[in-house]
Amino acid sequence: VGANDGLVSNLALVMGVGATGVAPSFVLFSGTAGLLAGALSMGAGEFVSVRSQRELLEATEESDFADSALPHLDLDANELALVYRTRGMDPDAAFDKAREVVTAAQAGSAPVAAAPGENSHDVVGSAWGAALSSFLFFASGAIIPVLPWIFGMAGFPAVALALGLVGIALLGTGAMVGLLSGASPLKRGLRQLAIGFGAAAVTYVLGLLFGVSA
């Protein structure tokens, strides 16, 4: 998904910028900026998402921070004293009796919290790992439309090569998704190609409309 995002978004960017008639160096700069901006945005968003999930899950874990106060609260003694009082016992006598029973039964034991790492929250994964993988996946796709300008090409040959490279990549990723999902690889590949080239066509037309002299 991240690689496809990079392919489509940066292809649309370089097509739109290139259609305005600006110098090839500006197209290269725009594509590189789009790559970094998109990859950093994906990485940062994934980091925040995973970190937030981990913090929410960790907040649900058992903790022993209040265990030291439990003996002073006499929760069980209070409940048992209420039972004795409903049976007609004097309040002070009911509480004294309840404390004797609870002390004898519990012997001062307190619940033990689970040790860190014993829960299944680690399935969420590392926030840094998720951020890095999202950054790399997006960048791996976003670099492809910029390759012709990186190697010094310009004009229509650069545009044609960028479209060809991205087209092959879109067909490949779409076919892979089709295989994994049990659908037709050709149909999924063509759908990815149509979406990517459709976005590029829109920005290219906009670039022509707002074009400037090189």
Image: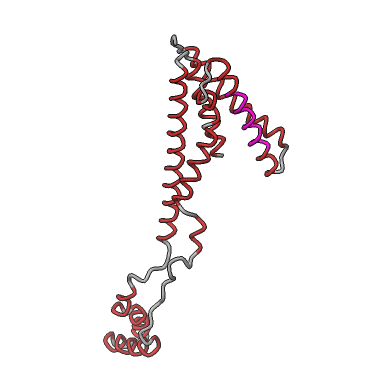
At horizontal 47% and vertical 32% (from top left) the residue drawn is 35
Main SS of residues in magenta:
helix
Q: Seen from this angle, which residue lies furthest left?
A: 92
At horizontal 38% and vertical 79% (from top left) the residue drawn is 110
Q: Which residues are magenta?
A: 162-175
Quarter of the image where one finds residue 3:
top right
The answer to whether 134 is drawn above or below residue 110 in the figure is above
Magenta region includes residue 167: yes
Residue 168 image position (x, y, % from top left): 64, 30
Number of numbered discs on residues: 0
Residue 109 image position (x, y, % from top left): 38, 83
Work out whether residue 56 or residue 98 is closer to the camera in this orientation and state it: 56
Is the N terminus in the top left, top right, bottom left or bottom right quadrant? Answer: top right
The answer to whether 137 is drawn above or below residue 70 in the figure is above
The answer to whether 63 is drawn above or below residue 74 in the figure is above
Magenta region includes residue 150: no
Work out whether residue 91 or residue 200 is closer to the camera in this orientation and state it: 200
The answer to whether 75 is drawn above or below residue 3 in the figure is below
At horizontal 43% and vertical 25% (from top left) the residue drawn is 29
Work out whether residue 141 or residue 177 is closer to the camera in this orientation and state it: 141
Residue 211 image position (x, y, % from top left): 46, 12
Residue 72 image position (x, y, % from top left): 28, 79
At horizontal 46% and vertical 34% (from top left) the residue drawn is 38
Is the C terminus in the top left, top right, bottom left or bottom right quadrant? Answer: top left
